[in-house]
Image (cartoon, rainbow, N blue to C red):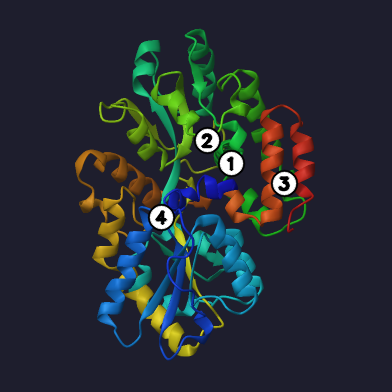
Amino acid sequence: MGLAAGTASAAALAACGSSGPSEKTDNGGAAAGGAATYWSLSGEPGEPIRKAAVDRFNAANPSTKITPTFFQNDAYKQKIKTSLGAGEGPTLIWGWGGGGLKEYVGSNQVEDLTDWFAQNAAVKDKILPSSFGAATVNGKIYAMPIETVQPIVLYYNKKVFEKVGVQPPKSWGEIMALVPKFNAAKIAPFSLGGQSRWTNMMWLEFLLDRTAGPEVFDAVFAGEANAWSNPAVLDMLTKIQDLVKANGFQKGFSSTTADSNADQALLYTGKAAMMVHGAWSYGIQKADGGDFVKSGGLGWMNFPPVEGGKGDPSSTVGNPGQYVSISSKATAEAKETAKKFLSTTMVDEEEKAGWVKSGGVPVLKGSESLFTGEDAQFQKDMSTIAANAKVFAQSWDQALSPTAAETLLDNIAKLFQLQVTPQQWVDAMNGVIGK
């Protein structure tokens, strides 16, 4: 499922329900009067929060109701694509932004919301600015960021660090210096669910950003020929293979799966010292790791800088939000209903509180006062990373087209298994730019 099983499952681990659509599907473009339709994902904890938002809106606007329909993750991806292609999609389209949104824009299936946001500056000002990157195509905004932010962070086992007598790394050089120390203690320096491929991708995303800044991948996303040929890419790929050759990951990492949370278990059982993973990992370790999180055994930080790198160390990657667009095929009245939903209910205090209670960090500003209890520090830190990020880059396999993303994931797996050289990797990826 690529990132949908990974960073998109940030929204979507929660998003995969056990049944199909929970309500009758409506045609958003043909909705009567000001009535509108909204398709999104089923399953805990997201579905109840999404349904509550629609219920709040409908209670306040009984003459222009929104009808929701909830789908399992994979079923939704297929259904929304075919329905929009047939001109039968919903008024409000839930999504991940990035490459999928770019395809909608290219097919004229979604509204340009740039002017609407300019006219509704107060609405835009309620949302973290870093979340708008994946909502933007060719400098124009085609979706509103909603729900939660999920940065990828470097986790570490504090007890293992104390046992070996070392400090958390503050640079790439320090990461490489820690590797032999943990190996000497018979502890894997890093846990990695390498069979899942998107887990490996997180390493490339951060290393390229820290080495070169966002410009290189921006050029890839823009479809510029041979954009992967930037010297910083070869440098980054070489660093990755240096880490693999130094036994930076657990033995047999390429057969470890992320879907089974085997990579998480290595960290909380002390068999690995560190792990690069998404914000959703915190909840998994809390649920599965006994008293590991509660006892203060888990540490976390933004990915450290690379010596001599051009990237801003405040920047992050992952899920800068989830997104909702308005169908260009909907009636004018339905579009107005959709915009009212976005400008009122989707930025209200109940929306914010619902996602915080679920353990998430909202895309809405000013959520910090709601972070209470045992998860408060983690939520505050994730919120700070998202709010302070100079760039919050979307994970590559969501930003790229499905064709390019599959080639990317395949070649990343080969890179970590030392089956391709950095130059061979670059050549393969240049071949699918813009596809």
Indicate the amino acid at tag 3.
Thr
Between the C-alphas of marks 3 and 1, the distance is 12 Å
> On the rendered image, what quadrant is the C terminus found in?
bottom right
To which residue does mark 3 refer?
407
Measuring from the top left, give residue 89's x and y in whole percent.
Answer: 55, 75
Mark 4 falls on what kind of element? loop
**Badge 1 vs badge 2, beta-carbon distance below 8 Å:** yes
Q: Quadrant of residue 339?
A: bottom left
To which residue does mark 2 refer?
258
Indicate the amino acid at tag 1.
Trp
Residue at the image point whose x is 57% and y is 21% from the top: 248
Mark 2 falls on what kind of element? loop
Between the C-alphas of marks 3 and 2, the distance is 20 Å
Task: Classify residue 114 as left or right of residue 125.
Answer: right
Residue at the image point whose x is 41% and y is 19% from the top: 270
Between the C-alphas of marks 1 and 2, the distance is 9 Å
Q: Earlier in the sequence, mark 1 or mark 2?
A: 1
Between marks 1 and 4 in the image, the one whose residue lies nearer the viewer: 4
Residue at the image point whose x is 54% and y is 32% from the top: 306
To which residue does mark 1 refer?
198
Indicate the amino acid at tag 4.
Gly
**Camera-nearest residue between 310 and 53:** 53
Residue 137's tag is none
Measuring from the top left, give residue 304's x and y in whole percent.
Answer: 47, 33
